[in-house]
Amino acid sequence: MTYIKRDLENKITALSKEYSCILVTGPRQVGKTTVLRRLMDDNREYVTLDDMAERTLAKRDPALFLQMHSIPIMIDEVQYAPELFSYIKMEIDKGAAPGSFWLTGSQAFMLMELSQESLAGRVAILHMSSLSQHEIYGSGYCPPFTLELSELKSREKTHTPANVAEIYNRIWKGSMPGLLSGKFSDHDVFYSSYIQTYIERDVKEQVQLSDPLLFRDFVRAAACRAGQMLNVHDIAGDVGVSDETAKRWLQVLEKSDVIFFLRPYSNNLLKRTVKTPKMYFFDTGLVAYLTGYSSPDILSKGAINGAILENYVVSELLKSYHNNAKECLMWYYRDKSSNEIDMVIEAGGTLYPFEIKRSINPGSELINTFKLLDKASLPRGKGAILCLRENLSAINSDNYIVPIWMI
């Protein structure tokens, strides 16, 4: 098994010198525990709340739990004992040294709420996604993706070029460390086990499931619509549940970091924009498995080849920010006349539009919709077409053609 270095490692090390508590959240099996255990020294004690005896003690008597273990400490799967947070706060307020508490958990929304209530100003919260393409195929430092020409050029040195076939190979393989590191080799068995474990350990804690197989069918129905505008009624109809049940189950998938939503961009000057979000999966390998595509070649020719490519691009852009511990204000634009911009990033009070195309030589007409943002209250900056071209190019000085492998 090969260890794959994570871009977030330097940020974890640096923040541990400033904050008494570091909380790393993210979905199951993305490597949170592996990374922190690799970074910790012999002085740090490791405790996992997967151990039922430790979990019971932490819940019933959190003060005694902390007395029984030495600091610095790493507490894995801390979501199982939210009672610990108030007592960790007390230790920090008593003067706990920077880096005293490393926490991990796989229910990001709940953990962020708990930590902000109990540890506001005392905890650095980091989100670890599944592997980015830079982590898998690249090298060196990878900053958040921007349209600064100098930074785009530097990415040519830190990222590995890929043609159309290789991009779909990356999409199909997915981004889970267990597969990419060589620990597991069977793609289908891995994802089948992943879904089963996820339902048994995460989903059942949040909703009552009379039929776990029904939820599995629901995830599959959602995967068929990855990269598209959300239609709750259609997903619910596919599996025979009510719209309200479908909404609750989508919230579970979002809270578990399996999916995320891109909301439509709007302000009071853009009154005719739609309100429906678009849905994406963090891991395209899971989408390929759930939708039954048995090879990268079949996927590249399949009905979802455009939607899953868009999903891959949006998730990779988001990972480039997560891996630098930065928030990304990311939207899409669509108005009631069906004019659409695939993605809009808001940064520094400026809007940056993007089109995502399954093309090697995209036409210049694709940037025409970027002008729709000129009516917004924020100024429009440079734009880009993200596509399957193998080298960096430009339409003009304000609009670039960027290969997807450079994200």
Image: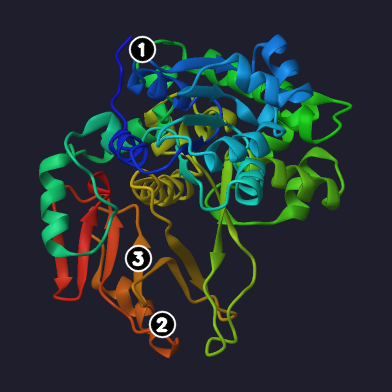
- How far is mark 2 from mark 1, CA to CA? 54 Å
- How far is mark 3 from mark 1, CA to CA? 47 Å
Q: Are dots 2 and 3 in contact, CB under 8 Å?
A: no
Residue for point 49% across, 41% down: 282
Q: Which mark is residue 373?
A: 2
Name the residue tied to disc 3. Answer: 354
Q: List x then y, in percent, for residue 72.
A: 45, 24
State whether residue 199 appears in this view: no
State left or right for residue 241 relative to residue 324.
right
**Residue in the foreground of this view, choosing between 87 and 185:** 87
Task: Specify the amino acid type for callout 1.
Answer: Asp
Name the residue tied to disc 1. Answer: 42
State left or right for residue 311 relative to residue 357.
right
| SS assignment at label 3 | strand
Dot placed on the residue nearer the N-terminal end, 3 or 1: 1
Local packing at callout 3 (Cα closer than 10 Å; few below 14, some 14-19, many 20+) is many
Task: Specify the amino acid type for callout 2.
Answer: Leu
Residue for point 55% across, 23% down: 75
Task: Specify the amino acid type for callout 3.
Answer: Phe
Disc nearest the viewer among 3 and 1: 1
